[in-house]
Image (cartoon, rainbow, N blue to C red):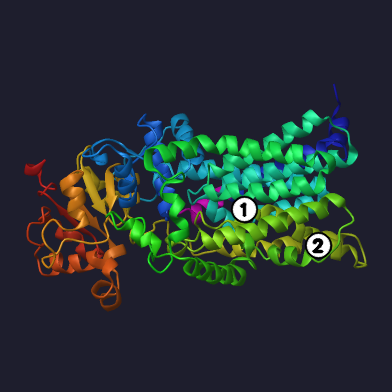
């Protein structure tokens, strides 16, 4: 057995130093996580997070890949494929908006841990327990990404670069916000780092010629598999197979076609079965997500496309010509270059990365990785610009359409590498100054997170419009088999666990013939709607420019008629309302006074 002196020596200068560093790092990261979650945790603020979570709950509870957030466009697509005369809302509604990997991961997490979806009304509401547990899962993925960033930077640069890059990555305020947002971004960053790791190992062995052909094909297939899994997490991620195949063709000599083909084939094999499923039930391989190109064009501003229900949909799509698509691309690309690119990943390290593109590296692997990153960057700018929808407008930074953030760990590595390269050119009076300069650099890069952690404490609720106890209260008045309609159906589906249709483009009105609106297309021919729930998303609209002039704000005019004039349109079946919440911009109309004891 080792004596006391041997143990002391081991942990001072021996191999134990590594374990001490690891323990200190883990404790520091754990402490930072606790402080951040206490001071900065917020309930879900994005449509996508709630949509994925409610879908995962349905899977975990054995309801299959079905959704309670029902888009009118989804009804239209499913009805076209269904037998004539059979309403699609009479049965469980298959989800057409989300690829399956992230909801399946959340569903497994929900099966493994005790999720409590009911909100206790006795104590003051502070946070929703399932959202806390989902944030913990994403933070575990974040920690895995930090570890891979360290390992990749140490392999490509050296240990000082690895430590500083890991600290800068772990101290990026935007990434911490993503970690508690409920989005799939952390999983995608981890997958992208796994792809880079595999490609760098392959590149090194290609130069050294130390592996067999079978090994290269297997690794290339693994890269394609990871890309395919990423594509089934977020469809836009699958586009990365193009720069990956180009990288394999450029740098893998006489086996280029073999490894490129293996990667492409593996990616296609992973994604294709899911696309066939979507096409079989809806006629669209990517479901409703496949129409992102048309969104935010002149015929489809905002969320108009997803709320489309009538048969004029094809003629409206035909109005989107090449000129409109080019205009969308130019406008969004300018925004990305001016706003997103300089602060990629939410850190000033992105600026150092952009400068590093002009610096030659003697390390061949670094030069080739930089080529890959540049190809990925250009491609993701194009995909992000063309795929922009109302989701980016609703939440400019924390959304699934922020694709550039996926490159953050590699960008930080090159940014840190450039800084230390410049630092090495400076003759410092004594060595500790170099360590101090590295610490100061890391502190400046992490400054946004530092200032966010300072007082005052962040308010944990996203209200308006989301107040989970009230949404759950309203939803509990509706039976599990009944149907609601709302301007935030994702929140009703998640917090209330009820089927909810997004408000249609038009609304019932005395000026429109009874039964001629899309509301009645759902109510009469699909399934009766038991309650209508409108929030500040509708009631806070500008009176003149939106409520009175825009045809897509018909529900704003409906609110004025039903709440201020105390009258609903003739023949409208939901005549009973709860008045006590109107001051908060909340309107609930039901087919009977369900909130009274007699009606239950």
Bounds of the magenta segment: 33-42
Magenta segment: does it hold 107? no
Q: Is residue 589 left or right of residue 52?
A: left
Q: Residues within 10 Å of mark 2 (few under 14, many from 20)?
A: many
Q: Is residue 39 magenta?
A: yes
The spot of residue 114 in percent (x, y) is: 42, 32
Q: Secondary structure at mark 2?
A: helix
Residue at the image point whose x is 33% and y is 57% from the top = 313
Residue under the image location 73 percent in, 34 percent down: 219
Of 388 and 423, which appears nearest the observer?
Answer: 388
Mark count:
2
Q: Which mark is residue 418?
A: 2
* x and y percentages locating residue 280 in the rendered image: 40, 37
Which residue is labeled 1 in the image?
406
Of 36 and 147, nearer the camera is: 147
208 up-or-down from 523: above or below = above
Q: Which residue is nearer to you in this view: 419 or 363?
A: 363
* Residue sitting farthest toward the top: 1
Q: Within the image, what quadrant is residue 279 found in?
A: top left
Give whichever of discs 2 and 1 has the lower sequence position: 1
Q: Is 221 situated left or right of 207 in this image?
A: left
* Residue at 47% across, 30% down: 112
């Amino acid at each position: 057995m080792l004596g006391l002196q041997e143990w002391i020596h081991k942990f001072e200068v021996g191999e134990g130093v590594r374990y001490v560093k690891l323990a200190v790092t883990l404790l520091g990261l754990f402490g930072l996580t606790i402080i951040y979650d206490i001071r900065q945790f917020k309930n879900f603020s994005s449509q996508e997070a709630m949509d994925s979570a409610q879908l995962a709950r349905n899977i975990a509870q054995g309801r299959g890949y079905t959704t309670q957030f029902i888009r009118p466009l989804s009804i239209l697509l499913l009805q076209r494929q269904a037998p004539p005369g059979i309403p699609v809302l009479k049965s469980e509604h298959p989800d057409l908006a989300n690829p399956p990997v992230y909801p399946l991961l959340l569903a497994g997490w929900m099966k493994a841990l005790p999720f409590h979806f009911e909100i206790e009304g006795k104590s003051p509401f502070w946070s929703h327990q399932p959202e806390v547990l989902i944030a913990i899962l994403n933070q575990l993925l974040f920690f895995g990404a930090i570890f891979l960033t360290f390992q990749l930077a140490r392999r490509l640069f050296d240990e000082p670069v690895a430590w500083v890059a890991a600290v800068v990555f772990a101290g990026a305020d935007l990434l911490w916000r993503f970690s508690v947002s409920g989005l799939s971004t952390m999983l995608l960053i981890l997958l992208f780092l796994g792809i880079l790791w595999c490609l760098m190992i392959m590149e090194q062995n290609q130069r050294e010629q130390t592996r067999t052909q079978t090994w290269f094909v297997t690794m290339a297939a693994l890269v394609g598999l990871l890309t395919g899994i990423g594509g089934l997490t977020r469809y836009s991620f699958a586009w990365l197979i193009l720069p990956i195949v180009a990288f394999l063709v450029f740098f893998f000599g006489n086996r280029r076609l073999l490894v490129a083909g293996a990667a492409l084939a593996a990616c296609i094999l992973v994604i294709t079965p899911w696309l066939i499923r979507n096409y079989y039930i809806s006629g669209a391989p990517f479901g409703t997500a496949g129409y992102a190109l048309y969104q935010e064009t002149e015929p489809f501003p905002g969320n108009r496309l997803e709320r489309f229900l009538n048969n004029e949909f094809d003629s409206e799509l035909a109005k989107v010509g090449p000129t409109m698509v080019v205009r969308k691309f130019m406008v969004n690309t300018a925004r990305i270059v001016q706003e997103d690119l300089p602060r990629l990943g939410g850190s000033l390290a992105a600026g150092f990365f952009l400068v590093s593109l002009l610096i030659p590296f003697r390390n061949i692997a670094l030069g080739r990785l930089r080529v890959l990153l540049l190809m990925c960057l250009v491609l993701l700018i194009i995909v992000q610009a063309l795929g922009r929808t109302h989701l980016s407008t609703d939440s400019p930074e924390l959304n699934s359409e922020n694709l550039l953030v996926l490159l953050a760990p590699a960008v930080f590595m090159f940014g840190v590498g450039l800084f230390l390269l410049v630092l090495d050119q400076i003759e410092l009076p004594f060595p500790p100054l170099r360590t101090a300069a590295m610490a100061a650099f890391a502190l400046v890069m992490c400054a946004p997170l530092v200032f966010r952690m300072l007082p005052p404490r962040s308010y944990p609720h996203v209200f308006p419009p989301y107040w989970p106890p009230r949404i759950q209260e309203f939803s509990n008045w509706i039976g599990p088999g009944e149907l609601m309609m709302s301007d935030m159906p994702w929140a009703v589906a998640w917090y209330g666990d009820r089927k909810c249709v997004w408000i249609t483009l038009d609304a019932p009105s005395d000026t429109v013939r009874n039964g001629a609106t899309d509301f009645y297309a759902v109510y009469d021919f699909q399934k009766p709607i038991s309650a209508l729930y409108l929030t500040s998303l509708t009631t806070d609209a500008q009176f003149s420019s939106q409520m009175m002039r825009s045809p897509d704000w018909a529900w704003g005019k409906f609110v004025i008629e039903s709440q201020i004039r105390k009258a609903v349109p003739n023949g409208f079946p939901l005549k009973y309302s709860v008045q006590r919440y109107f001051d908060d911009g909340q309107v609930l109309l039901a087919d009977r006074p369900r909130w009274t004891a007699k009606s239950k």
